[in-house]
Amino acid sequence: MIRRLLALAALVAAAVLLSPFVLSSTDTGAMPQVAQDYIRNAPEDLGGANIVTSVIVTYRGLDTLGEVAVLFAATAGVGALLRSASKTEKTIGPRREASEILETGAGFLFPLIVLFGAYIFTHGHLSPGGGFQGGVVVATAFLLLLLAGRIRAFGHGPMALVESLSGFAYVAVALAGLIFAAGFLDPRFLPRGEFGRLFSAGAIPIIYSLVGLKVGAELMGVLAGMRPSEGGAS
Amino acid sequence: MTLLIVLALGVLMVVAGVTALYLKNLSAAVIAAGAVSLLASIVYLLLAAPDVAMTEAAIGSALTTVVFLYALARIRGRGKEDPRD
Amino acid sequence: MIVQAVVATGALLILVGLWGLLTRRNLVKMILGFSIMDTGTHLLIVGLGYREGATAPILDASTPVGTPMVDPVPSALVLTAIVIGLAVTALMLAYAVRLHGSRGSAAIDDFKENAL
Protein backbone atom coordinates (compact mmCIF):
# COMPACT_ATOMS: atom_id res chain seq x y z
CA MET A 1 0.00 0.00 0.00
CA ILE A 2 2.66 2.47 1.01
CA ARG A 3 4.75 1.31 -1.91
CA ARG A 4 1.94 2.10 -4.34
CA LEU A 5 1.55 5.57 -2.89
CA LEU A 6 5.27 6.23 -3.11
CA ALA A 7 5.34 5.05 -6.73
CA LEU A 8 2.41 7.31 -7.52
CA ALA A 9 4.14 10.25 -5.83
CA ALA A 10 7.28 9.60 -7.87
CA LEU A 11 5.21 9.55 -11.06
CA VAL A 12 3.49 12.81 -10.18
CA ALA A 13 6.86 14.43 -9.44
CA ALA A 14 8.25 13.21 -12.77
CA ALA A 15 5.18 14.54 -14.59
CA VAL A 16 5.60 17.93 -12.93
CA LEU A 17 9.27 17.98 -13.98
CA LEU A 18 8.42 17.13 -17.59
CA SER A 19 5.53 19.54 -17.97
CA PRO A 20 7.59 22.62 -18.99
CA PHE A 21 8.78 20.68 -22.05
CA VAL A 22 5.25 19.81 -23.07
CA LEU A 23 3.68 23.17 -22.40
CA SER A 24 6.24 25.56 -23.75
CA SER A 25 7.76 23.84 -26.77
CA THR A 26 6.81 25.30 -30.09
CA ASP A 27 7.18 24.54 -33.77
CA THR A 28 8.38 27.91 -34.91
CA GLY A 29 11.02 29.05 -32.46
CA ALA A 30 14.43 30.11 -33.65
CA MET A 31 17.15 27.50 -33.73
CA PRO A 32 20.01 27.82 -31.30
CA GLN A 33 22.98 29.76 -32.63
CA VAL A 34 25.28 26.73 -32.60
CA ALA A 35 22.94 24.76 -34.84
CA GLN A 36 22.61 27.64 -37.26
CA ASP A 37 26.39 27.88 -37.48
CA TYR A 38 26.69 24.16 -38.14
CA ILE A 39 24.11 24.25 -40.92
CA ARG A 40 25.67 27.31 -42.51
CA ASN A 41 29.31 26.27 -42.30
CA ALA A 42 29.34 22.49 -42.65
CA PRO A 43 28.96 22.18 -46.44
CA GLU A 44 31.78 24.55 -47.37
CA ASP A 45 33.99 23.72 -44.42
CA LEU A 46 33.90 19.95 -44.63
CA GLY A 47 32.32 19.17 -47.99
CA GLY A 48 29.85 16.54 -46.81
CA ALA A 49 26.21 16.63 -47.86
CA ASN A 50 24.86 15.05 -44.68
CA ILE A 51 25.10 17.66 -41.96
CA VAL A 52 24.26 15.22 -39.16
CA THR A 53 27.27 13.10 -40.19
CA SER A 54 29.49 16.18 -40.18
CA VAL A 55 28.30 16.99 -36.67
CA ILE A 56 28.86 13.45 -35.40
CA VAL A 57 32.25 12.87 -36.96
CA THR A 58 33.83 16.30 -36.71
CA TYR A 59 32.09 18.90 -34.61
CA ARG A 60 31.14 16.40 -31.89
CA GLY A 61 33.81 13.85 -32.76
CA LEU A 62 34.96 13.36 -29.17
CA ASP A 63 31.45 12.22 -28.23
CA THR A 64 31.66 9.52 -30.89
CA LEU A 65 35.03 8.38 -29.62
CA GLY A 66 33.60 8.20 -26.11
CA GLU A 67 30.58 6.29 -27.35
CA VAL A 68 32.78 3.69 -29.02
CA ALA A 69 34.68 3.35 -25.74
CA VAL A 70 31.44 2.89 -23.76
CA LEU A 71 30.30 0.23 -26.21
CA PHE A 72 33.60 -1.58 -25.75
CA ALA A 73 33.26 -1.45 -21.97
CA ALA A 74 29.73 -2.83 -22.13
CA THR A 75 30.78 -5.65 -24.46
CA ALA A 76 33.64 -6.55 -22.17
CA GLY A 77 31.29 -6.46 -19.18
CA VAL A 78 28.75 -8.76 -20.81
CA GLY A 79 31.48 -11.19 -21.82
CA ALA A 80 33.04 -11.19 -18.37
CA LEU A 81 29.72 -11.67 -16.57
CA LEU A 82 28.36 -14.43 -18.74
CA ARG A 83 31.47 -16.36 -19.65
CA SER A 84 31.90 -18.08 -16.33
CA ALA A 85 28.22 -18.64 -15.64
CA SER A 86 27.63 -21.39 -18.14
CA LYS A 87 28.28 -24.15 -15.65
CA THR A 88 25.54 -23.19 -13.23
CA GLU A 89 22.92 -22.47 -15.85
CA LYS A 90 20.48 -24.69 -17.57
CA THR A 91 21.47 -25.29 -21.13
CA ILE A 92 19.12 -25.68 -24.03
CA GLY A 93 18.87 -28.98 -25.83
CA PRO A 94 20.59 -29.77 -29.11
CA ARG A 95 19.10 -27.72 -31.90
CA ARG A 96 17.11 -29.16 -34.76
CA GLU A 97 18.63 -29.15 -38.18
CA ALA A 98 17.40 -26.26 -40.29
CA SER A 99 15.28 -26.92 -43.35
CA GLU A 100 16.86 -26.53 -46.75
CA ILE A 101 14.82 -23.47 -47.67
CA LEU A 102 15.98 -21.65 -44.58
CA GLU A 103 19.63 -22.49 -45.09
CA THR A 104 19.65 -21.65 -48.78
CA GLY A 105 17.66 -18.46 -48.26
CA ALA A 106 19.93 -17.27 -45.47
CA GLY A 107 23.03 -18.06 -47.51
CA PHE A 108 21.60 -16.13 -50.44
CA LEU A 109 20.59 -13.10 -48.42
CA PHE A 110 23.76 -12.81 -46.35
CA PRO A 111 26.08 -11.24 -48.97
CA LEU A 112 23.30 -8.87 -50.07
CA ILE A 113 22.73 -7.64 -46.54
CA VAL A 114 26.47 -7.21 -45.91
CA LEU A 115 26.72 -5.25 -49.17
CA PHE A 116 23.82 -3.08 -48.10
CA GLY A 117 25.44 -2.43 -44.73
CA ALA A 118 28.76 -1.55 -46.36
CA TYR A 119 26.94 0.83 -48.72
CA ILE A 120 25.29 2.53 -45.76
CA PHE A 121 28.45 3.17 -43.84
CA THR A 122 30.58 4.26 -46.77
CA HIS A 123 27.92 6.71 -48.04
CA GLY A 124 27.29 8.18 -44.62
CA HIS A 125 28.36 11.65 -45.69
CA LEU A 126 26.09 11.71 -48.76
CA SER A 127 22.77 10.20 -47.73
CA PRO A 128 21.01 9.29 -44.50
CA GLY A 129 22.94 6.60 -42.73
CA GLY A 130 26.49 6.22 -41.62
CA GLY A 131 28.68 4.12 -39.40
CA PHE A 132 26.23 3.14 -36.65
CA GLN A 133 23.44 2.10 -38.98
CA GLY A 134 25.77 0.21 -41.36
CA GLY A 135 27.50 -1.57 -38.49
CA VAL A 136 24.18 -2.69 -37.03
CA VAL A 137 23.02 -3.98 -40.45
CA VAL A 138 26.23 -6.02 -40.85
CA ALA A 139 25.81 -7.46 -37.35
CA THR A 140 22.22 -8.38 -38.22
CA ALA A 141 23.43 -10.21 -41.34
CA PHE A 142 25.72 -12.39 -39.22
CA LEU A 143 22.89 -12.94 -36.75
CA LEU A 144 20.76 -14.23 -39.66
CA LEU A 145 23.43 -16.81 -40.45
CA LEU A 146 23.58 -17.82 -36.79
CA LEU A 147 19.81 -18.20 -36.45
CA ALA A 148 19.49 -20.19 -39.66
CA GLY A 149 22.12 -22.66 -38.56
CA ARG A 150 24.68 -21.88 -41.24
CA ILE A 151 27.37 -21.13 -38.64
CA ARG A 152 27.58 -22.58 -35.14
CA ALA A 153 28.94 -19.55 -33.33
CA PHE A 154 30.65 -16.24 -33.96
CA GLY A 155 34.37 -16.75 -34.19
CA HIS A 156 35.93 -14.96 -31.27
CA GLY A 157 39.29 -14.44 -32.98
CA PRO A 158 38.20 -12.59 -36.14
CA MET A 159 35.73 -10.47 -34.20
CA ALA A 160 38.34 -9.36 -31.67
CA LEU A 161 40.81 -8.69 -34.49
CA VAL A 162 38.39 -6.50 -36.46
CA GLU A 163 37.36 -4.63 -33.36
CA SER A 164 40.88 -3.86 -32.14
CA LEU A 165 42.23 -2.98 -35.58
CA SER A 166 39.39 -0.61 -36.39
CA GLY A 167 39.61 1.06 -32.99
CA PHE A 168 43.35 1.52 -33.40
CA ALA A 169 42.91 2.87 -36.93
CA TYR A 170 40.24 5.29 -35.72
CA VAL A 171 42.61 6.82 -33.16
CA ALA A 172 45.43 6.80 -35.76
CA VAL A 173 43.28 8.79 -38.23
CA ALA A 174 42.31 11.18 -35.44
CA LEU A 175 45.98 11.73 -34.60
CA ALA A 176 46.71 12.23 -38.31
CA GLY A 177 44.17 15.04 -38.16
CA LEU A 178 46.14 16.52 -35.27
CA ILE A 179 49.45 16.29 -37.16
CA PHE A 180 48.39 17.29 -40.66
CA ALA A 181 45.36 19.49 -40.11
CA ALA A 182 43.94 21.81 -37.53
CA GLY A 183 43.23 19.51 -34.61
CA PHE A 184 42.34 16.11 -33.18
CA LEU A 185 39.73 14.35 -35.35
CA ASP A 186 39.91 17.06 -38.00
CA PRO A 187 39.10 15.34 -41.30
CA ARG A 188 40.53 18.03 -43.51
CA PHE A 189 43.93 16.49 -44.00
CA LEU A 190 42.55 14.64 -47.01
CA PRO A 191 41.32 16.70 -49.96
CA ARG A 192 37.75 17.93 -49.86
CA GLY A 193 37.02 16.70 -53.34
CA GLU A 194 33.95 17.37 -55.39
CA PHE A 195 30.72 17.79 -53.46
CA GLY A 196 28.56 14.69 -53.67
CA ARG A 197 31.17 12.18 -54.81
CA LEU A 198 32.02 9.13 -52.75
CA PHE A 199 35.64 10.16 -52.15
CA SER A 200 34.99 13.63 -50.83
CA ALA A 201 34.67 15.42 -47.52
CA GLY A 202 38.22 14.67 -46.44
CA ALA A 203 38.60 11.76 -44.05
CA ILE A 204 34.91 11.60 -43.00
CA PRO A 205 34.09 8.41 -45.01
CA ILE A 206 37.19 6.71 -43.60
CA ILE A 207 36.41 7.65 -40.02
CA TYR A 208 32.77 6.65 -40.31
CA SER A 209 33.59 3.32 -42.01
CA LEU A 210 35.98 2.49 -39.16
CA VAL A 211 33.30 3.42 -36.63
CA GLY A 212 30.85 1.20 -38.51
CA LEU A 213 33.19 -1.79 -38.46
CA LYS A 214 33.93 -1.33 -34.78
CA VAL A 215 30.29 -0.96 -33.78
CA GLY A 216 29.33 -4.01 -35.86
CA ALA A 217 32.06 -6.15 -34.29
CA GLU A 218 31.16 -5.00 -30.79
CA LEU A 219 27.45 -5.70 -31.25
CA MET A 220 28.31 -9.17 -32.53
CA GLY A 221 30.39 -9.60 -29.38
CA VAL A 222 27.41 -8.64 -27.22
CA LEU A 223 25.20 -11.15 -29.06
CA ALA A 224 27.80 -13.90 -28.78
CA GLY A 225 28.15 -13.25 -25.06
CA MET A 226 24.42 -13.35 -24.37
CA ARG A 227 23.72 -16.38 -26.48
CA PRO A 228 22.77 -19.48 -24.49
CA SER A 229 25.09 -22.42 -24.85
CA GLU A 230 23.79 -25.60 -26.41
CA GLY A 231 23.64 -29.18 -25.33
CA GLY A 232 25.72 -29.03 -22.19
CA ALA A 233 28.92 -27.80 -23.82
CA SER A 234 30.08 -24.71 -21.96
CA MET B 1 -2.39 15.62 -41.67
CA THR B 2 1.05 14.84 -40.30
CA LEU B 3 -0.21 15.90 -36.92
CA LEU B 4 -2.99 13.30 -37.04
CA ILE B 5 -0.54 10.56 -37.96
CA VAL B 6 1.83 11.59 -35.19
CA LEU B 7 -1.01 11.64 -32.66
CA ALA B 8 -2.28 8.21 -33.74
CA LEU B 9 1.23 6.74 -33.56
CA GLY B 10 1.75 8.34 -30.16
CA VAL B 11 -1.41 6.77 -28.76
CA LEU B 12 -0.41 3.39 -30.21
CA MET B 13 3.05 3.69 -28.66
CA VAL B 14 1.74 4.44 -25.18
CA VAL B 15 -0.81 1.59 -25.44
CA ALA B 16 1.91 -0.82 -26.57
CA GLY B 17 4.16 0.35 -23.74
CA VAL B 18 1.52 -0.23 -21.08
CA THR B 19 0.69 -3.61 -22.65
CA ALA B 20 4.34 -4.62 -22.57
CA LEU B 21 4.49 -4.01 -18.84
CA TYR B 22 1.21 -5.74 -18.07
CA LEU B 23 1.55 -8.98 -20.05
CA LYS B 24 2.32 -12.09 -18.04
CA ASN B 25 4.03 -13.89 -20.90
CA LEU B 26 7.53 -12.38 -20.94
CA SER B 27 8.26 -13.18 -24.59
CA ALA B 28 5.11 -11.36 -25.65
CA ALA B 29 6.07 -8.40 -23.45
CA VAL B 30 9.44 -8.20 -25.21
CA ILE B 31 7.75 -8.20 -28.63
CA ALA B 32 5.42 -5.41 -27.49
CA ALA B 33 8.42 -3.31 -26.45
CA GLY B 34 9.90 -3.96 -29.91
CA ALA B 35 6.66 -2.64 -31.38
CA VAL B 36 7.11 0.59 -29.36
CA SER B 37 10.55 1.06 -30.94
CA LEU B 38 9.23 0.37 -34.43
CA LEU B 39 6.47 2.97 -34.08
CA ALA B 40 9.02 5.41 -32.67
CA SER B 41 11.15 4.98 -35.78
CA ILE B 42 8.18 5.98 -37.96
CA VAL B 43 7.69 9.10 -35.82
CA TYR B 44 11.38 9.96 -36.25
CA LEU B 45 10.94 9.80 -40.01
CA LEU B 46 8.01 12.20 -39.78
CA LEU B 47 10.18 14.52 -37.69
CA ALA B 48 12.70 14.80 -40.58
CA ALA B 49 15.44 12.79 -38.82
CA PRO B 50 16.10 9.85 -41.18
CA ASP B 51 19.42 8.85 -39.57
CA VAL B 52 17.76 8.43 -36.19
CA ALA B 53 14.88 6.50 -37.80
CA MET B 54 17.27 3.98 -39.37
CA THR B 55 19.21 3.53 -36.15
CA GLU B 56 16.11 3.12 -34.00
CA ALA B 57 14.54 0.60 -36.38
CA ALA B 58 17.69 -1.50 -36.59
CA ILE B 59 18.74 -1.34 -32.95
CA GLY B 60 15.52 -0.79 -31.06
CA SER B 61 13.30 -3.34 -32.69
CA ALA B 62 15.80 -5.92 -33.95
CA LEU B 63 18.82 -6.13 -31.68
CA THR B 64 17.15 -5.19 -28.39
CA THR B 65 14.44 -7.82 -28.95
CA VAL B 66 17.04 -10.48 -29.77
CA VAL B 67 19.13 -9.61 -26.69
CA PHE B 68 16.04 -9.81 -24.47
CA LEU B 69 15.00 -13.16 -25.95
CA TYR B 70 18.51 -14.57 -25.45
CA ALA B 71 18.42 -13.47 -21.82
CA LEU B 72 14.99 -15.06 -21.35
CA ALA B 73 16.28 -18.30 -22.89
CA ARG B 74 19.16 -18.34 -20.42
CA ILE B 75 16.83 -17.70 -17.52
CA ARG B 76 14.26 -20.28 -18.46
CA GLY B 77 16.59 -22.95 -19.79
CA ARG B 78 14.49 -23.56 -22.86
CA GLY B 79 15.68 -22.95 -26.39
CA LYS B 80 15.29 -19.56 -27.96
CA GLU B 81 12.02 -19.36 -29.86
CA ASP B 82 12.70 -21.25 -33.03
CA PRO B 83 12.20 -18.99 -36.07
CA ARG B 84 10.54 -21.79 -37.97
CA ASP B 85 7.62 -22.18 -35.55
CA MET C 1 1.71 21.48 -32.65
CA ILE C 2 3.67 18.50 -33.92
CA VAL C 3 6.48 19.26 -31.50
CA GLN C 4 4.05 19.35 -28.60
CA ALA C 5 2.42 16.06 -29.65
CA VAL C 6 5.79 14.30 -29.92
CA VAL C 7 7.10 15.78 -26.66
CA ALA C 8 3.89 14.73 -24.88
CA THR C 9 4.24 11.20 -26.25
CA GLY C 10 7.85 11.06 -25.14
CA ALA C 11 6.94 12.31 -21.67
CA LEU C 12 4.14 9.74 -21.40
CA LEU C 13 6.50 6.96 -22.40
CA ILE C 14 8.97 8.11 -19.74
CA LEU C 15 6.19 7.98 -17.14
CA VAL C 16 5.04 4.53 -18.36
CA GLY C 17 8.60 3.22 -18.15
CA LEU C 18 9.10 4.73 -14.70
CA TRP C 19 5.85 3.18 -13.47
CA GLY C 20 6.92 -0.23 -14.81
CA LEU C 21 10.28 0.15 -13.10
CA LEU C 22 8.71 0.99 -9.75
CA THR C 23 5.81 -1.44 -9.60
CA ARG C 24 6.87 -4.61 -11.39
CA ARG C 25 8.48 -7.48 -9.51
CA ASN C 26 10.21 -9.39 -12.27
CA LEU C 27 13.76 -8.30 -13.11
CA VAL C 28 13.22 -8.62 -16.86
CA LYS C 29 10.06 -6.49 -16.66
CA MET C 30 12.00 -3.80 -14.81
CA ILE C 31 14.67 -3.79 -17.51
CA LEU C 32 11.90 -3.59 -20.11
CA GLY C 33 10.64 -0.51 -18.27
CA PHE C 34 14.13 1.02 -18.51
CA SER C 35 14.19 0.35 -22.24
CA ILE C 36 10.82 2.06 -22.72
CA MET C 37 12.04 5.05 -20.67
CA ASP C 38 15.05 5.25 -23.01
CA THR C 39 12.82 5.30 -26.07
CA GLY C 40 10.65 8.02 -24.51
CA THR C 41 13.67 10.20 -23.70
CA HIS C 42 15.04 9.94 -27.23
CA LEU C 43 11.64 10.82 -28.67
CA LEU C 44 11.50 13.88 -26.44
CA ILE C 45 14.95 15.10 -27.48
CA VAL C 46 14.40 14.63 -31.22
CA GLY C 47 10.97 16.19 -30.92
CA LEU C 48 12.48 19.35 -29.47
CA GLY C 49 14.65 19.73 -32.56
CA TYR C 50 11.84 19.85 -35.10
CA ARG C 51 10.91 23.05 -36.92
CA GLU C 52 7.69 23.43 -38.85
CA GLY C 53 8.01 23.16 -42.60
CA ALA C 54 11.69 22.26 -42.43
CA THR C 55 13.30 19.25 -44.02
CA ALA C 56 16.05 16.81 -43.07
CA PRO C 57 19.54 18.34 -42.78
CA ILE C 58 20.91 16.65 -45.91
CA LEU C 59 21.84 18.65 -48.98
CA ASP C 60 21.24 17.28 -52.43
CA ALA C 61 19.84 18.41 -55.76
CA SER C 62 16.42 19.22 -54.38
CA THR C 63 17.49 20.89 -51.14
CA PRO C 64 20.08 23.53 -51.98
CA VAL C 65 21.94 25.52 -49.38
CA GLY C 66 19.51 27.84 -47.67
CA THR C 67 16.45 25.59 -47.35
CA PRO C 68 15.05 25.66 -43.82
CA MET C 69 16.30 22.58 -42.01
CA VAL C 70 15.66 20.96 -38.68
CA ASP C 71 18.22 21.13 -35.90
CA PRO C 72 20.98 18.56 -36.57
CA VAL C 73 22.40 18.49 -33.04
CA PRO C 74 19.57 16.51 -31.33
CA SER C 75 19.74 13.90 -34.12
CA ALA C 76 23.47 13.49 -33.55
CA LEU C 77 23.06 13.18 -29.77
CA VAL C 78 20.20 10.69 -30.01
CA LEU C 79 22.11 8.49 -32.50
CA THR C 80 24.83 7.97 -29.92
CA ALA C 81 22.29 7.57 -27.14
CA ILE C 82 20.38 4.78 -28.92
CA VAL C 83 23.50 2.67 -29.36
CA ILE C 84 24.60 3.23 -25.77
CA GLY C 85 21.07 2.37 -24.60
CA LEU C 86 21.36 -1.02 -26.25
CA ALA C 87 24.77 -1.64 -24.67
CA VAL C 88 23.51 -0.72 -21.19
CA THR C 89 20.38 -2.88 -21.65
CA ALA C 90 22.57 -5.85 -22.59
CA LEU C 91 24.73 -5.27 -19.51
CA MET C 92 21.66 -5.06 -17.25
CA LEU C 93 20.32 -8.29 -18.73
CA ALA C 94 23.66 -9.99 -18.13
CA TYR C 95 23.40 -8.98 -14.47
CA ALA C 96 19.82 -10.29 -14.34
CA VAL C 97 20.94 -13.63 -15.75
CA ARG C 98 23.70 -13.89 -13.14
CA LEU C 99 21.34 -12.92 -10.32
CA HIS C 100 18.87 -15.55 -11.46
CA GLY C 101 21.66 -18.11 -11.59
CA SER C 102 22.68 -17.39 -8.04
CA ARG C 103 19.25 -17.53 -6.34
CA GLY C 104 17.12 -19.42 -8.79
CA SER C 105 14.45 -16.74 -9.05
CA ALA C 106 13.94 -13.64 -11.13
CA ALA C 107 11.68 -11.77 -8.73
CA ILE C 108 13.17 -8.77 -6.98
CA ASP C 109 11.54 -9.69 -3.66
CA ASP C 110 13.89 -12.63 -3.24
CA PHE C 111 16.91 -10.39 -3.30
CA LYS C 112 16.14 -8.24 -0.33
CA GLU C 113 18.65 -8.08 2.44
CA ASN C 114 17.27 -7.64 5.92
CA ALA C 115 18.72 -4.38 7.09
CA LEU C 116 18.16 -4.94 10.80
Image (spheres, coloured by chain):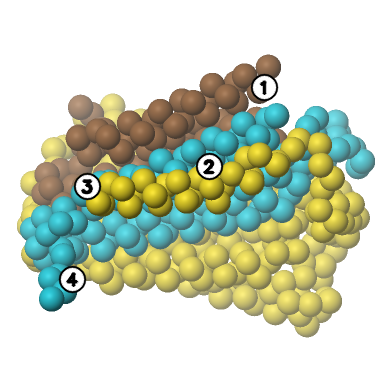
Chain colours: A yellow, B brown, C cyan
- Nearest to the eye among marks 3 and 2: give it: 3
Give the labeled residue for mark 4. Answer: A84
Tag 2, which secondary structure?
helix
**Badge 4 amino acid:** Ser
Q: Chain of mark 1?
A: B
Q: Chain of mark 2?
A: C
Q: Left of A205 or right of it: where is A118?
A: left
Looking at the picture, how far across and down is residue C95, in whole percent?
26, 63
**Badge 1 amino acid:** Thr
Tag 4, which secondary structure?
loop
**Badge 3 amino acid:** Met
Tag 1, which secondary structure?
helix
Q: CA distance from mark 3 to mark 4?
A: 40 Å
Give the labeled residue for mark 1. Answer: B2
Q: Between C101 and B85, which is closer to the camera in this rendering?
A: C101
Q: Between A99 and B70, which is closer to the camera in this rendering?
A: B70
Discs 3, 4: same chain: yes
Task: Classify A91 as above or below B36.
Answer: below
Give the labeled residue for mark 3. Answer: A1
Q: CA distance from mark 1 to mark 3?
A: 43 Å
Residue ID at (68%, 44%): C48
Discs 4, 2: same chain: no
**Badge 2 amino acid:** Ala
Residue ID at (15%, 43%): B79
- Nearest to the eye among marks 3 and 4: give it: 3
Q: CA distance from mark 4 to mark 2?
A: 40 Å
- Nearest to the eye among marks 4 and 2: give it: 2
Looking at the picture, how far across and down is residue C62, in whole percent?
85, 31
Task: Classify A47 as above or below A71.
Answer: above
Q: CA distance from mark 1 to mark 4?
A: 51 Å
How many C-alpha atoms fall within 10 Å of the one at disc 3: few (<14), some, or many (≥20)? Answer: few
Q: CA distance from mark 3 to mark 2?
A: 26 Å
